[in-house]
Structures are given as C-alpha cells and as structure tokens.
Amino acid sequence: MSNNLSVKISRLMSLALRHSPETLGITLDENGWCEVPKLLTGLENKGHSINIDTLTAIVKSNEKQRFAFDDSGTRIRANQGHSLNVDLGLSEAVPPEYLFHGSTVSNLASIQANGLLKGGRQHVHLSTDFDTVLAVGKRHGKPLIFQVSAGKMATEGYKFFVSANEVWLTDFVPPEFIQVL
C-alpha cells in the first residue's frame, strides 16, 4: 500500500473514530471502541477494501500513534482527540514540570487572553516533545510554541491525564501558566 493511501485511510479512520462514526456507518461504545470487522466494512463501503493485516500496519505505522487495538485485537479506537463524549478510562497522572502546545501566530492574542481551550474536543492536548508541537503548529500557519507550567498547575489542583500515545490532556490551561517560546 502506498504511503499516500495509508495516510488517506488513517485520516478517514481519525474522522470516524474521533468525531463522526456515521462517516463509515459505525458505532462507538461509551469508551470509544469499535468492532474491527465493522470498521473494515465501513472502509470498504468508502472504497478502501483492506484486511486486518493492512489495518494493523496502518495502526502501527501511524507516526502519532493515534489508534489502538484492545487486548483481544477485536476492537479499535482513537487514543485521544475526540469531539464525541467518550470515556477513555484514563487515570489522573502527575505531569512533568513543563509541557508544550503548538498553535499559530494568529491565535496568540486569544491564547494570551483566554488561555488554552479545548474547543470542540474533550481536552487540551499537550506534549513533552517540542518537535511534535512544532509540527502541529505548522499544519495551520506560522507556528508558535507555548510552554505550559504543568507542574505548577497540578500543585494548584488542575487535573492531567496521559493517553496511550503519551499525549498529555487537561480541561483548560489558564493564561498565567503559559509562556510563549
């Protein structure tokens, strides 16, 4: 399978498993899981006939590790980034002293005034990896990186979670915990 086709299928899976399951005619349970055969049928109905081995290769090769199979390998879900209300079963975690968030210069004034908001998603996404957040910022314009004083936020009672692919999640980051790098 070509890399372009793999990326196209991965994006379609992201859309269905994070935001719009009806795109592939699938349903997600309360924890965001979908039966693998139903996902494969949904992809086939959209013109992408792949087997479980190809699906596994797409999941494993996804550079951001957006997807995960359950322990039995019979269900799949997105690791984070949902606009749908799903319970990923994440436990509260103690964050490192600093985390990073990638955005664009065009969002600077809003972020300085209002902080980092989750928007249409369940959480604000943060990372320990500077290169990752730089790539996120570049997707939408001239990138801007924010350093978040996550350790200080945690000591003041803000909750953090970490997804299976090591994306740090929180509900809100107030402006006083944000520094532009």
Image: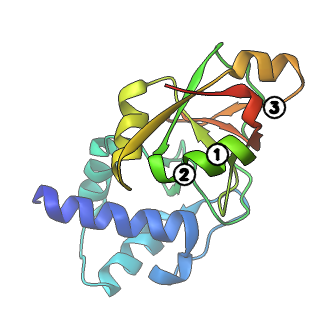
Q: Residue at x 64, y 64 (%)?
A: 83
Q: Which residue is drawn at 34% across and 76% down?
A: 43
Q: What residue type is labelled 1?
A: Ile
- Check disc 3 and report the residue beneath it: 159
- Check disc 1 and report the residue beneath it: 111
Q: Which residue is drawn at 85% across and 16% down?
A: 155
| Vertical position of residue 73 compared to residue 49: above or below | above
- Check disc 2 and report the residue beneath it: 107
Q: Could you give the CA–CA distance between mark 3 and mark 1, rounded to whole angstroms?
A: 20 Å
Q: What residue type is labelled 2?
A: Asn
Image quarter (top left, top right, bottom left or bottom right) of the N terminus? bottom left
Task: Pick whichever of labels 3 and 2 is earlier in the sequence.
Answer: 2
User: Is 36 on the left-hand or right-hand side of 33?
Assistant: left
Can you tell which quarter of the image residue 134 is in? top left
* Nearest-to-viewer mark from 3 and 2: 2
Label 3 neighbourhood size at 10 Å, few (<14), some (14-19), many (20+)? some
Q: Could you give the CA–CA distance between mark 3 and mark 2, rounded to whole angstroms?
A: 24 Å
Label 1 neighbourhood size at 10 Å, few (<14), some (14-19), many (20+)? some
